[in-house]
Amino acid sequence: MAAVSTILVFDSGLRGAAAVLLLLIGGSLVRDYGKSPAARLGAAFAIGVAAYVFCSAPGFSDHRELWHAPILGLCSGNVVIFWLFTRAMFDDSFKHRWWHAAIWILLVGSGLLRLFVWAPGGSSLSEPVGIALSLTSAGFAVLAVAQSVAGWRADLVEGRRRLRPLVVGGVAAYITIIAIAEIKLRGRPAPLAASAMNAAGLATIQSS
């Protein structure tokens, strides 16, 4: 029991630190570069990851309340925000399109329906929709990698060149690993040790 309590305290501390840092990053991006689409999307992605910090905490999704819905919705759609952020960051011709919002709404709606309607009601849709959402996350991570690799050699902006390996080797890989883990768990809670490792990974990525 003492070991479990220690892990939970460690997990909560890491998640709290990661969430605060993410919100500070998001606020700084809006404050300093608010006119840039990449900065706004970067801030939105940081807020979405802060939401995921809580979504992935032990027991959070097992005791769903109505006030959890905005947080869970941000988690469901954040992979689209990440993809759009990489496009805005690495593609100078990027423009917002109406269907970008439509994809985000589709993922958020599907995630909320699964968590609040299909899963509690024992619907046969719950598991395949969960798998589809995890596969979609991995797919958008692959698209983000493709966007960051495209034009790498020709990119003359040194800051962006340094950021590309972080996107390729860090965030996108992390999203893919989490998606695979979610498919293997199939709605079951992750072991406490795995949750603590997830929290440590989140804190490490934000501090890098």
Image (spheres, rainbow, N blue to C red):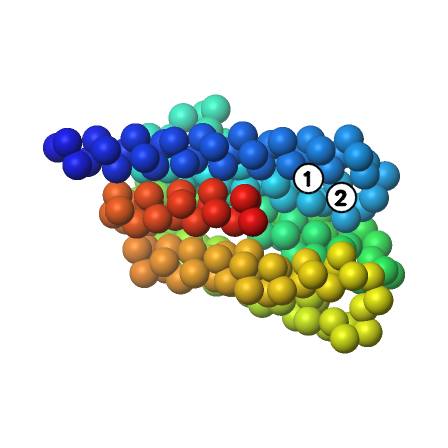
x and y, in percent, of residue 131 in the image = 41, 59
Q: Residue at x 70, y 52 (%)?
A: 85
x and y, in percent, of residue 109 in the image = 55, 43
Write down the quadrant of residue 29 in the picture.
top right
Question: Label 1 belongs to which residue?
Answer: 43
Q: Residue at x 84, y 54 (%)?
A: 95
Give the tally of numbered discs.
2
Image side of residue 167 versus residue 99, left or right: left
Question: Label 2 belongs to which residue?
Answer: 39
Closer to the camera, 206 or 77? 206
Q: Quadrant of the N terminus?
A: top left
Could you tell me the amino acid type at mark 1? Ala
Question: Do the residues under discs 1 and 2 have CB atoms within 8 angstroms?
Answer: yes
What SS does tag 2 mark?
A: helix
Q: Residue at x 33, y 45 (%)?
A: 195
Could you tell me the amino acid type at mark 2? Ala
Residue 37 in view (yes/no)? yes
